[in-house]
Image: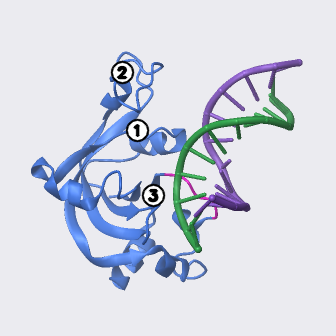
Chain colours: A blue, B green, C purple
DNA sequence: GCCAACGTTGGC
DNA sequence: GCCAACGTTGGC
């Protein structure tokens, strides 16, 4: 089982939104970056677990653990003309963008902040993608050792 | 296929 | 709001 980190801006979609959703699950869609798309399309499997990470907010960091409950399918928002993520170049015959469905497994007891992660950027968390300068990927794989270490901070 | 211009992301 | 770091676009 592979681990992941999924980025969201809490002002757009928060863990509260996820907790309030039916079955505490949602379609993880709207990803419009090819590298992130490829992770979703080619590597994310049902049963995988991911950290939910808050960005562009007062306290960036990991806030929850989610589980992939349905693997890859074409991103429906790309087909919806009224959706801000609509993409005329994506057709149902040849989809360009993909989604998966995630369910809230549990909230962390507290936010594991970006500042805490950065404090270990040169030892336990060396080469963690989210800590790379200028990182903008919204979907990144997490090494097993990193996953365990981050949870040990909780 | 190169690369400059432009837009977006995201920490601070 | 600033700005660095990227990704994308489009002229050539």
Q: Are marks 1 and 2 in contact (CB under 8 Å)?
A: no
Mark 3 surroundings: few (<14), some (14-19) or many (≥20) residues within 10 A: many
Marked residue nearer the N-terminal end (1 or 2):
1
Residue A148, percent across and down? 37, 76
> Label 2: chain?
A
Quadrant of the rendered image containing residue A71: top left
Q: Are marks 3 and 2 in contact (CB under 8 Å)?
A: no
> Label 3: chain?
A
Quadrant of the rendered image containing residue C4: bottom right
- Classify A123 as above or below A105: below
Asked which secondary structure carries label 1, the reply is helix
Marks 3 and 2, Cα distance to the nearest angstrom? 31 Å
* The N terminus of chain A, quarter of image: bottom left
Marked residue nearer the N-terminal end (3 or 2):
2
Residue A21, percent across and down? 15, 50
Q: Which residues are magenta?
A: A133-137
Name the mark on residue A102. Answer: none
- Circle 1 residue: A41
Q: Are marks 1 and 3 in contact (CB under 8 Å)?
A: no
* The C terminus of chain A, quarter of image: bottom left
> Label 1: chain?
A
- Circle 2 residue: A81
Mark 2 surroundings: few (<14), some (14-19) or many (≥20) residues within 10 A: few
Is the residue at mark 3 from the same chain as the one at mark 2?
Answer: yes
Q: Is residue A138 left or right of residue C10?
A: left
- Classify A39 as above or below A67: above
Marks 1 and 3, Cα distance to the nearest angstrom? 13 Å
Front residue of A42 and A50? A50
Residue A2, percent across and down? 37, 58
Name the mark on residue A141. Answer: 3
Q: Mark 3 against mark 2, which lies toward the viewer?
A: 2
């Amino acid at each position: 089982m592979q681990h992941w980190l999924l980025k969201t801006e809490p002002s757009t979609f928060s863990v509260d939104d996820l907790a309030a959703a039916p079955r505490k699950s949602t379609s993880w869609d709207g990803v419009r970056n090819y590298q992130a798309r490829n992770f979703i399309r080619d590597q994310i499997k049902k049963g995988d677990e991911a950290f939910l990470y808050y960005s562009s907010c007062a306290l960036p960091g990991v806030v929850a653990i989610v589980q992939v409950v349905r693997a890859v399918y074409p991103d429906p928002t790309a087909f919806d003309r009224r959706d801000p993520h609509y993409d005329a170049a994506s057709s149902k015959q040849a989809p360009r963008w993909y989604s998966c469905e995630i369910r809230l497994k549990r909230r962390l007891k507290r936010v594991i902040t970006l500042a805490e992660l950065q404090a270990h950027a040169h030892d336990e968390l060396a080469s963690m993608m989210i800590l790379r300068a200028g990182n903008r990927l919204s979907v990144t794989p997490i090494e097993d050792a990193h996953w365990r270490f981050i949870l040990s901070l909780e």
